[in-house]
Image (cartoon, helix red, strand yellow):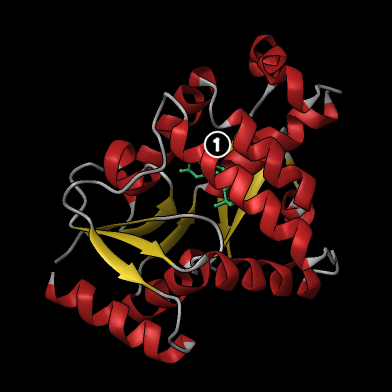
Amino acid sequence: MSHIQIAIDGPSGAGKSSLSKAVAKAMGIIYVDTGALYRTVGYFARSKGITLDNISALVPHLGELNIEVRYENEVQCVYLNGENLGDRIRENEISMYASKVSAIPEVRAFLLDTQKDIARKNSVIMDGRDIGTVILPDADVKIFLTASNEVRARRRVKELEEKGMPASYEEVLSDMIKRDEQDRSRDIAPAIAAPDAIHFDNSYEGFDEALEALLTVIRNA
Ligand code: DC
């Protein structure tokens, strides 16, 4: 297949990004992390002094926002008004901001073309919450990746620790459950599986086994 689109949806910590990166490498295609776009908008909202309980105050400021995605050494970099934010968008507080801004219809509309454009121009594996349902409804393969809450929270704690932003397991677990519920129950583009998605449970397997299993699912789809 010359041009391929793979959609990976599922809650945070299910292993979407690490598995997608490895699949992209194995297949010679681009990995697109769409959560990074919502995180960047969340970061912008916080920098404007907008609070989580008044997040819709962001809407009038969207015109001041320019987001650009560039690939540098095969790594996705998101630029906010010309500045690469790097790991600053991974902070725990920014996770909650990202979840809040992602429920605003104007924000989803604002990011729609950026995502569709990348997939039009490149073969991609794109991960997020609405990739199979909204962004790439005609994707060649749709995967809904899940794992238990405990496994997902442990992964997030490890990831934050590795990035030098330690957070407690209890805090990460409770924030994650709250955020998932918020993402799943929102009116627009709720984080649910597409009807034709293949469900893939990533709770128990080691990374290499999970990757092999996922590649087999993709190749056989
Ligand atoms: O994948 P992530 O944890 O980096 O995503 C951050 C937030 O952005 C998450 O709470 C849900 C939201 N999001 C979304 O609504 N749609 C996407 N395609 C990707 C992320």
Is 172 left or right of 167, judged from the image as shown? Answer: left
Whether the residue under disc 1 has CB within 8 Å of ligand 1 = yes
- Where is residue 212 shown, x and y percent of the image? 32, 87
Quadrant position of ligand 1: top right
Tell me what residue is drawn at x 22 percent, y 41 percent. Answer: 137
The front one of 201 and 25 is 201
Is 134 left or right of 139, judged from the image as shown? Answer: right
The front one of 153 and 166 is 153
Secondary element type, mark 1: helix
- Name which quarter of the figure residue 67 lies in: top right
> For the view shown, which residue lies furthest in the top direction?
60
Is 77 left or right of 106, judged from the image as shown? Answer: right
Tell me what residue is drawn at x 36 percent, y 67 percent. Answer: 29
- Name which quarter of the figure residue 136 lies in: top left
- Where is residue 97 shown, x and y percent of the image? 70, 36
Residue 190 sits above or below residue 187 on the image: below
Tell me what residue is drawn at x 43 percent, y 90 percent. Answer: 208
Residue 97 sits above or below residue 212 on the image: above
The front one of 66 and 106 is 106
Is 59 left or right of 129, judged from the image as shown? Answer: right
Residue 214 sits above or below residue 87 on the image: below
Residue 115 sits above or below residue 126 on the image: above
- Where is residue 116 shown, x and y percent of the image? 35, 38
The N terminus: image quadrant:
bottom left
- Where is residue 33 shown, x and y percent of the image? 51, 54
The C terminus: image quadrant:
bottom left
The residue at which mark 1 appears reads as 182
> In this orientation, does residue 73 appear?
no
> In this orientation, does residue 198 appear?
yes
What's the amino acid at mark 1? Gln
Tell me what residue is drawn at x 64 percent, y 13 percent. Answer: 59
